[in-house]
Amino acid sequence: MWMLEMILATYSPVNLLLYHLQMIKLEVTEKFPHIQDYLAFKVPPGLDTKTLLKCQLAVAAHNSDGKCTNATGLQLPGVLDELFSYNGPLGALFFEESVLLYLWAPTAQAVRACIYRDPSGGDPLEIVQLEEVNGVWSTEGPKRWEGCYYVYEVLVYHPSTLRVEKCIANDPYARGLSSDGRRTFLVNFDSDRLKPEGWDDLANEKPKISSFSDISIYELHIRDFSANDHTVPPEFRGGYLAFTLQGSSGVLHLKKLSDAGITHVHLLPTFQFAGVDDEKVNWKCVDTKMLEQLPPDSDEQQALITEIQNDDGYNWGYNPVLWGVPKGSYASNPNGPCRIIEFRKMIQALNRIGLRVVLDVVYNHLQGSGPFDENSVLDKIVPGYYLRRNTDGFIEHSTCTNNTASEHVMVERLILDDLLHWAIHHKVDGFRFDLMGHIMKSTMVKAKDALHSLTKEMDGIDGSSIYIYGEGWDFGEVAKNGRGVNASQFNLGGTGIGSFNDRIRDAILGGSPFGHPLQQGFATGLLLQPNGHDQGTEAVAECMLAVAKDHIQVGMAANLRDFVITNYQGEEVKGSEVLTHDGTPVAYALCSTETVNYVSAHDNETLFDIVSLKTPKEISVDERCRINHLATGVIALSQGIPFFHSGDEILRSKSLDRDSYNSGDWFNRLDFTYNSNNWGVGLPPKEKNEKTWPLIKPRLADPSFKPQPGHILAAVDNFLNLLRIRYSSPLFRLRTANAIQERVHFHNTGPSGAPGVIVMSIQDGREGVSGLSQLDPTYSYIVVIINACPTKVSFACSALRARTLKLHPVQAMSTDELVKSSTYEASSGSLAVPPRTTVVFVEPREV
């Protein structure tokens, strides 16, 4: 007897009992906890359930006289999972003499494949009726189909229209597309014509990574990378092939980052997304020479940009249409195999300059739904299955739009298959999950296990080196495990899956992206250099700064739950006992690679912009640049995995835009020639920023806020030095929680600690001496001092007495004269550090 999931939104348990319907306890209420308070019922024996599922279904309540008193529709994912879960082939399979198509569509009444010669226009070469076996439709075609295009015509009842509709859709397992996803391209990935020279041997060329603790990540948008780079030919700008040009400004910059220590480039969405036409001839643009003549605080730039923002070549890409195909607008030709070949060339080129590649995957939502939306695919094939719905039957939109449901068996399978496709056929090295908390923990663990099971011998890739991480935010319908145990920060401990540490970001900068933009933090002047915003009394500000310091110290110890610090009150507490303002524990990780520390990302203002907002208006641009350096220094020298937004190292500005997802090339410009940081290019777009225009306008109008090329060059130098320091010692990249607890210590703690100063030491052992093992052949002891104060500070500590500490050689050779003025006095263990500076002292081993 099969069990139906019935979400009866119009009924309460009392109503249902009145009608004497038979109640049973079903496992479905455990699988779907949001309906656990509803009653479950058994379908009467003898019903042809599989046939019924192809029709419109309803449940009615009748009184004793047989009169219908209420009725409701059904949500079917539970029963579809029970009856039709499937692990056989899906998509297109290629054989020596034939091409086979498989489509999972158990509620469809009929399915036809329309085969076309061309990517658009014309009549079908053939229209083939697919045959169904237990919910899977299939057909066998001739080998000549390879290189053709197709769409499915699915006759299916759609709950959004309450009618049987003829839906025209791409294959959910599409691996190639025509321009703008009009048709699925029948592409055989075993074909040699898809492989750049040396492609099959790329797994052996990849940069070595001995431990995930050695990872550092640089987040980059494909179009940002080269759209403004005049060392790149116009036809390559903004696309995949720009990464293959060894002498371009952008590639030379990436080489510098790679040589200094960056291991991974995280690319914002590269799959087929909506919002950008694949055909470049259809794009609209604004004359940049005209924009350059406008005042830095003018609202004219944003008005001209937003007028065409949905018709230009720019979008971040968090609006998925099909997950398994490279985006066509980044290719020189969106039709045929070109986008696949050029995507592979990009991966290969980045690997060859020492950078592994992370793809930003967005499995939590889809851009389209319904039977007619041109961006709808999955909801046309099996309506009501792939998208998560509330108890009233409406699609959940907490992730922006059309939330997907990984708790459904075939949704999870599609995600896993897609990840394996990118890993095996495109040889990518990691995945960053957008809004990962909206995906079930079990799905994420299965994804990690499936990827790590890949081998060079069997799959052409070493899956054990693939790192996965994401946004573990816990909100919306999934909050507090509302749809099952989700992949939120606190649920992922022990999995080895990374999640972004927003605690260290907020403590460094102040407030949160959702709070007042002038709320200051550790690095931006809280207590020590107020900006005029009401932060509370001096005592309140002093407490806030002390709490922020605790949060940062926990984050610098990889945000480990069990790491013990002395808090600002002088108590020894675990990281999980240090709390945020709302009582949430700061620490959530059980191992260092579960924490991704960051201070800025593509979301929200850039690091330089947020510093320019939060610091007092009267300070100099030199001071703001030092604060930018200080913030990146905290991240670079912390345990855990450091993550940097592209442009942090060149003082990148978006003219104070807080959400530039659709703000065009103008507000998102990167300049790898180091001549400009893009500050003061007009008021940012009205839609997301108008409320803060009164704060933004005077800052943009003030020429003293704008960094000069010298500032940018100094920022690059500082950033590279921070990376060199991190990779100069394995002590900055400890691999176990136990090693971090034993070796990392914080001084200047408790109620007597000097405000605005963090002092961290990392201790190594000595060969032949019991206790700590020796990890570093060069240094036996490291001290990191972070001085966020606007003045020089001196700090004496008995633990630092009688050591042979010296300024780190990288800093001793740097162009930063201030950092070189730092001193250590052995007899008192005293350190003197200039204002707004991160200093590293090392104790060289005796030769």
Image (cartoon, helix red, strand yellow):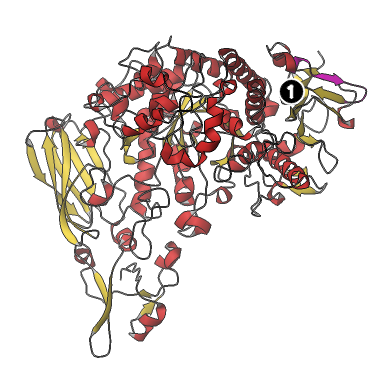
Which residue sits at x=30%, y=21%? 195
Which residue sits at x=44%, y=48%? 443
**Magenta stretch contains residue 823:** yes
Q: Nearer the viewer, residue 759 or 436?
A: 759
Q: Position of residue 218 (x, y in %)?
A: 52, 27
> In the visual, does 545 lie left or right of 281?
right
Instruction: Name the residue tied to disc 1.
Output: 839
Q: Quadrant of residue 744?
A: top right
Q: Position of residue 771 (x, y in %)?
A: 81, 33
> In the visual, does 638 lie left or right of 455?
right
Query: Is residue 345 among the parts visible in the rendering?
Result: no
In the image, residue 741 above or below residue 835: below
**Magenta stretch contains residue 361:** no
The disc labelled 1 sits on which kind of residue? Val
In the image, residue 137 above or below residue 214: below
Q: Position of residue 320 (x, y in %)?
A: 34, 40
Q: Nearer the viewer, residue 490 or 497?
A: 490
Q: Which residue extends farthest top?
A: 247
Magenta residues span 819-829
Indicate the quadrant containing the C terminus: top left, top right, bottom left or bottom right: top right
Query: Is residue 255 among the parts visible in the rendering?
Result: yes
Indicate the quadrant containing the N terminus: top left, top right, bottom left or bottom right: bottom left
**SS at mark 1 in the image:** strand
Please tell me how crowded label 1 is: few (under 14), some (14-19), or many (20+) other residues with Cα within 10 Å. many
Q: Nearer the viewer, residue 46 or 790?
A: 790
Q: Quadrant of residue 599?
A: top right
Q: Nearer the viewer, residue 374 or 420?
A: 374
In the image, residue 227 above or below residue 463: above
> In the visual, does 321 lie left or right of 229?
left
